[in-house]
Image (cartoon, coloured by chain):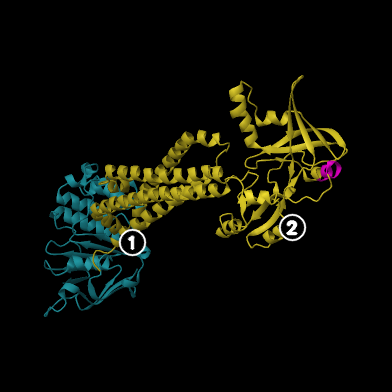
Chain colours: A yellow, B cyan
Amino acid sequence: MKDIIWKLLRQHISKSQLIGFAIANLIGLTIVLLAVQFYRDVRPVFNDEESFISKDYLIITRAVTGAGAMMGNNGEFSDADIQDLENQPWCRQVGRFLNSDFAIDAQLGVGSGHAMHTQFFFEAIPDEFIDIDPNAWGFSLEKPEVPVVISRDYLSLYNFGFAATQGMPKISEGQAEMLPLEFTLSGNGQRKVMSGHIVGFSNRLNTVIVPQEFMEWANGYFGSGATQHPQRLIVEVNKPGDVKIEEYMDQHNYEVAGDKMSSSKANYFLTVISGIVIAVGVIISLLSFFVLMLSIYLLLQKNTRKLQDLLLLGYSPNQVSRHYILLVVALNAAVLVLAIILMLIGRMAYMDMIHAFGISGAGIWVSILVGILIMGAITAGNIHAIRQKVNSLWLLEK
Amino acid sequence: MELITLNNTLPRVFAGHNGIHSDVWLQDVRLERGKRYLISAESGTGKSSMCSYIYGYRQDYSGSIAFDGKDIHSLSIDQWCDIRQRHIAYLPQDMRLFGELTAMENVELKNRLTGFKTSEDIKRLFDTLGIADKLDSLASKLSIGQQQRVAIIRTLCQPFDFILLDEPVSHLDEENNRIVARLITDEAQRQGAGVIATSVGNHLKMDVDNTFNL
């Protein structure tokens, strides 16, 4: 037997109103989900956690001024400078960049016969500041091989600047890591040829990093023996956006390397814009919620007599409202599923751009969860209103 | 449920009227299970109001109404649903059939809530009341008399301690009046239930224990 109650109650259901609601809510929810997803996908571009300087790290140098250079100020940080930095409340720890105090000649062997020579430099920082985890990091004299991490920009520079214009083949990161390197280290009357290879790429750090234990050994072996003061520091901070940091840097004439500051501004605008788009989506969803509410109220109003008669027969308000609740839940669930599908389609459209930044994009679960939460809230509101309305029909006269 | 009592009950619209001479309003009335009552009334004396108060869908009265001594104001919605499904069967004066459903669907709407009668039982009742050919007709297409009989069948599709009939035979002829009276008294007897029938003129043809003039 077919559901007789539904046969009764579905009368006066306005399909156009429900479709209107569904479309409006679909648009609103899709905007919200897409904005959330886009924000999460794009944020790593500005806030790269894989980067050598993740969001909690700043690299600082002294500003090079004509007067300073004239006075022999070579941009070094003294122990007192570092001490002062470490005492700042926003500073967690300070790492020193160690420079190579010897001559390096690098040879890149491409097949037999061809080789590229260049003068080279190394820097080292303590391992705890390295947040990528390169393979075979470290150094021992028994097996003297030099692992290096280079800036990803160097590879881009070669691929898009040099190779593209000179008809050279482009190389991937994997291929680059397989290239044999040969370093000729000299100084202090010593000379040594050591092999090496690239073990990782850093997104933002514009330098060549070797393990600190190698640098210490090499500086001792080839170096002049003079005490070295670092010219660059890496600072781990509590809050990268803190105004006090900027004030301190300005006051001491320090420069923060890279696009850290501008990227946090871009990040800020991304957040604001995403917030506005999400708010627009939420408002549309909210309006559509009222459209549905209105439609349900009209429906219940038109069916008042039938609902009352069902109650008189002994049907409980829950039994009667269940049908409308099922309708709303089914409708809202369909809108949610469609919105998620549209969000995924929209995402595909911009993912190529995200991939071009070398970022894989965030997971989709947070957006889906947001969708479920919004739809859950809307559905709960609908259910509450339906129950309220049906319950109000219980007594004809008080 | 054994006993329905009305204590000093009066529809609020009658408040302030002097000279109310009624066996029900402003009296103490006891309606016991197993007995049969006729509420005889003139039009406009509040007979349907009384039914709606007892059935719990209107509360615009003063005084009190109690089931087994318990004031019905204190009953929850769940308790009322239980009462409407298993303790009080009610035939409203205006029948309240669903015109867009067939006669059979109207009856089944009640019966599937209670599971009280089989499909065959229901068809037999249609047959007894001479409307077997109307099973699949839309209720809105039936004559008032036929609608009244469908509504009576629907009212019988539940267990009850009391059956409350608001002008059950107002649109029926003598013959059908007799048949309805027999059906109702038989069913009430089988269940040991009380019968409360109202009438403005065309009384249900059954023997009564007590008649109240409203």
Answer above or below: position of A297 versus A109.
below
Apparent side of residue A313 relative to residue A366 in the rendered image (left or right):
left
Q: Name the residue under label 1.
A: B191
Residue neighbourhood size for the residue with mark 1, other residues' Cα within 10 Å, grouped as few (<14), some (14–19), many (≥20): some
Q: Where is residue A364 in the image (x, y as percent from the top left)?
A: 52, 42
- Residue in the image at 18% along x and 76% along y: B23
In the rendered structure, find residue A79 and report the number of the disc placed on it. Answer: 2
Q: Helix, strand or loop at disc 1? A: helix
Foreground residue among A225 and B144: A225
Label 2: chain letter? A
Label 1: chain letter? B
In the rendered structure, find residue B132 and report the number of the disc placed on it. Answer: none
Main SS, magenta region, reads helix
Q: Are marks 1 and 2 on the same chain?
A: no
* Residue B162 figure quarter: bottom left
Amino acid marked by disc 1? Gln
Compute the Cα span from label 1 to label 2.
102 Å
Q: Can residue A2 be seen in this view?
A: no
- The residue range painted magenta reads A216-223
Foreground residue among A395 and B180: A395
